[in-house]
Amino acid sequence: MVSAASKPARHTPVKIVVAGGFGVGKTTFVGAISEIEPLRSEALITQASSGIDELFEDGSKTTTTVAMDFGRISLQDGLVLYLFGTPGQDRFHFMWHELAKGAIGAVVLVDTRRLDACFAAIDFFEQRDTPFMVVVNTFDGRLNHSLEDVREALNVSPDVPMAYCDARVRVDVQNTLYQLVEYALLRALQGIPVS
């Protein structure tokens, strides 16, 4: 006879996608929260990608994700979030369909200095009718724009949750993930299907 104390804990796996444009902080976001060593598929940015990929003119970004980032975080009540960070370069967007399969929701990270870099991610999740939230990466704690100004600039529906988050700060990332899971659960309880 197996006692209740010796039964293995039940885990509920949940897939979440972390998306956004090049250099918005997706790899940092996944790495800040993952309880395991995150899987990263970073490659050096070389001059060969000039004219193909978006590059930072100041040369401050030296690597880019070429496949995905992967991390895991266990929350209360056996909920285990599996985080899949998408590559931000336009030429890798074809991978987003595979990464998004089975996801309950997505975080779309935004850099307000380059709003145009996040439109593709927002469009992607809107077209799939996947629950997503827009998260403004605060980069060194700077709040350059109100969330309502960002919502208006991105033309995002009023029901889409928005938040500020420093992608380097574990508690900020954790709060963002809780908010996304609650939003996805609310939509599921309302009977809104996930693609």
Image (spheres, grey):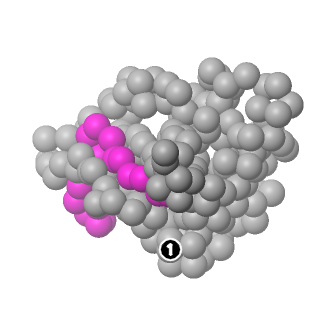
Report the side of 151 relative to 77 (left or right): right
Seen in the picture, residue 23 relative to 171 is either above or below; the reply is above
Image coordinates for residue 189, horizontal then vertical, percent? 82, 34
Report the side of 190 relative to 84 (left or right): right
| Residue 35 seen by the camera | yes
Seen in the picture, residue 188 relative to 16 is either above or below; the reply is above
State the image quarter where residue 75 is shown. Answer: bottom right
Magenta stretch, residue numbers = 56-74
The residue lying at 65 percent from left, 73 percent from top is 143
Report the side of 50 relative to 34 (left or right): left
Provide the secondary structure element on which disc 1 rests: loop
Image coordinates for residue 3, horizontal then vertical, percent? 53, 53
The residue lying at 29 percent from left, 66 percent from top is 60
Residue nearer the viewer, 153 or 5: 5
The residue lying at 75 percent from left, 45 percent from top is 183
Q: Is residue 11 magenta?
A: no
| Residue 113 seen by the camera | no
Looking at this view, name the residue that lies furthest to the bottom.
141
Q: Is residue 65 magenta?
A: yes
Image coordinates for residue 158, horizontal then vertical, percent? 84, 44
Residue nearer the viewer, 62 or 114: 62
Report the side of 144 relative to 7 (left or right): right
Q: Residues within 10 Å of mark 1 (few under 14, many from 20)?
A: some
For label 1, the residue is: 169
Image coordinates for residue 20, horizontal then vertical, percent? 50, 45
Seen in the picture, residue 91 relative to 49 is either above or below; the reply is above
Residue nearer the viewer, 49 or 41: 41
Q: Amino acid at mark 1?
A: Val
The residue lying at 41 percent from left, 60 percent from top is 34
Query: Which image quadrant: the C terminus?
Result: top right
Looking at this view, name the residue that lies furthest to the front.
1
